[in-house]
Amino acid sequence: MELPPGLSVRRDAGRGRFANAWLDARFSFSFGDWHDADWLRFGPLLAINEDLVRPGTGFTMHAHRDLEILMLPRSGRIEHRDSEGGHAVVAPGDLHFMRAGRGIRHSQMNPSNREVDHHFQIWLEPRTRGLDPAVRTLQLPAHGAGEWVVLASGRGSGGVAIDTDADVMLGRVEAGVPLGVPTAPGRRRYLHLMRGIAKAVGVVLAAGDALADHDGNADLVLRTDSSAEALFFDLPPKSNEPGAN
């Protein structure tokens, strides 16, 4: 069927993939050695990476700079250590935030000897360069089917405060309980299905699929016959940055 103006579909099959002995990762936007000229980024949204990390392995100490990074565990745990002396074990139901700012080093390991660490890692470009590094772990508030919870916002909407003109939300849809996507006229929206199968504007979405709305006007309501979860990003209008979708 024909999509409403300004709307495009990003299929899971088009995402990048990297796999080795300890990591199986999917990339929604160009990342590392994987390049997609059509999906370099979506405004200040630079990365939605879905990672599966084998027990007892992970990302050893490495550096970041000028990024707002969100980690959302789905199963298993993440053990974080950083050059500022921070240490945290992050589990499902938590949100981990790291502001790389003027520079920070950190490791991100799976501390279990039997469980796979399955998490989403989100990178956002900050408005301001060279901020002081900061690290926080928050417990997510309870939310029911048909509701959104704000994970992070640079617009005063709740969640962890980020230095990006964006709202990042997590929502759940169940059979008989639709999930309406907030409109954002004149802005851009990105809806990524994390789990399950759902339908919006006549399009069936499976886990890993996404809808990109370039003008914020489309009437989007997620419906499902079972259960599904989604990430939603409210983002600024298209600008002149290189590679912006």
Image (cartoon, rainbow, N blue to C red):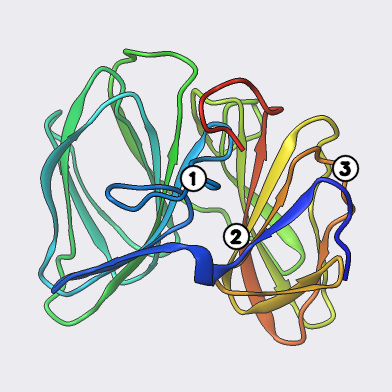
Q: Residue at x 87, y 42 (%)?
A: 217
Q: Which mark is residue 88?
A: none
Q: Quadrant of the C terminus?
A: top right
Question: Farthest residue toward the bottom?
Answer: 225
- Kindly report the distance in space between the C-alpha atoms of the residues bearing marks 2 and 3: 29 Å
- Residue 208: which quarter of the image? bottom right
Q: Earlier in the sequence, mark 1 or mark 2?
A: 1
Whether 157 is drawn above or below 127: the answer is below
- Callout 1: SS: loop
Q: Residue at x 46, y 50 (%)?
A: 36
Asked whether the viewer can see residue 229, the reply is: yes
- CB atoms of marks 2 and 3 within 8 Å: no
Whether 119 is drawn above or below 155: the answer is below
Density class for disc 1 (Cα within 10 Å; few <14, some 14-19, many ≥20) is few
- Kindly report the distance in space between the C-alpha atoms of the residues bearing marks 3 and 1: 25 Å
| Rendering coords of residue 166 (x, y %) | 61, 32
Residue under numbered circle 3:
217
Q: Which mark is residue 37?
A: 1
- Callout 3: SS: loop
Density class for disc 2 (Cα within 10 Å; few <14, some 14-19, many ≥20) is few
Q: What amino acid is labelled 3 in the image?
A: Asn
Q: What amino acid is labelled 2 in the image?
A: Ala
Density class for disc 3 (Cα within 10 Å; few <14, some 14-19, many ≥20) is some
- Kindly report the distance in space between the C-alpha atoms of the residues bearing marks 1 and 2: 38 Å
Residue under numbered circle 2:
142
